[in-house]
Amino acid sequence: MSKKALVVDDEKAIVKGIKFSLEQDDIVVDCAYDGQEALDMARAGEYDIILLDVMLPKLTGFEVCQQIREFSNVPIIMLTAKGDDLDKILGLEYGADDYITKPFNILEVKARIKAIIRRAGRSNTGVEKVMTFGNLKLNEEYRRVYIKDQEINVTSREYELLELLASTPGKTYTRDELLEAIWGSDYPGDARTVDVHIRRLREKLEPNPSEPRYVRTKWGAGYYFQA
């Protein structure tokens, strides 16, 4: 079955170019040109990935991303201005999985999209593989997280980060090791990306994020999972 993408940018030439390129790889592409239109389409449709510009009319990309996260964990890649680190960090804070800076190489965009879709689209075998730690449960087959049997809405990157840490309780990973394991060795971001995702995970999982029960910090070394 073909994958489906939503491409959002107020520059129609950019949307047209991305749409044409993705369609060459049999990806079905819907297009939106302002934030409100993008949000409406995300609510109405099922997408495998959303490519979302930061600067949009009506609603900003940050606002769209934040509101989508209230009802969906669809992977979101933000398009940010070149060299604007604040936009990158804000995008991750609002729930984006990745970011690409403009101007970009369309081959890089396609590679990032394919990688995220591949990781998020593991086929279901019908066999539940579950990790349980007290009130926390990870369903590895369906990539879902539960606290006290209540599902927690996490992004694909947040899930992958938590799954890696939980699969080796007590093992400390440096930020660079986590960055390479989850985002890949060619990822242009830095270790702050890991810090943002760890903070978001704690806010979602921990009753008191400043005193985490599960995702712990080993000062001067990195992060580890406490079983």
Image (spheres, helix red, strand yellow):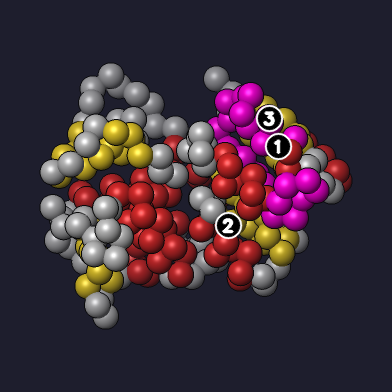
Instruction: Please tell me how crowded label 1 is: few (under 14), some (14-19), or many (20+) other residues with Cα within 10 Å.
Output: many
Tell me the residue at 55%/64% (across/down).
89
- Magenta segment: does it hold 38? yes
Cα separation between marks 3 and 2 = 20 Å
Which residue is found at the position 52% from the left and 57% from the top? Answer: 92
Q: Secondary structure at mark 1?
A: helix
Q: Quick check: 25 above or below 53?
A: above
User: Horizontally, is 210 left or right of 184 in the view?
Assistant: left
Q: CA distance from mark 3 to mark 1?
A: 5 Å
Does 86 sit above or below residue 157? below
Q: Which mark is residue 41?
A: 3
Q: What amino acid type should be assigned to the residue bearing mark 3?
A: Met
- In the rendered image, which quarter contains the N terminus? top right
Quarter holding residue 51: top right
Above or below residue 59? Residue 28 is: above
Magenta stretch holds residue 203: no
Q: Magenta stretch: give its range.
A: 37-60
First reached walking from the N terminus: tag 1 or tag 2: 1
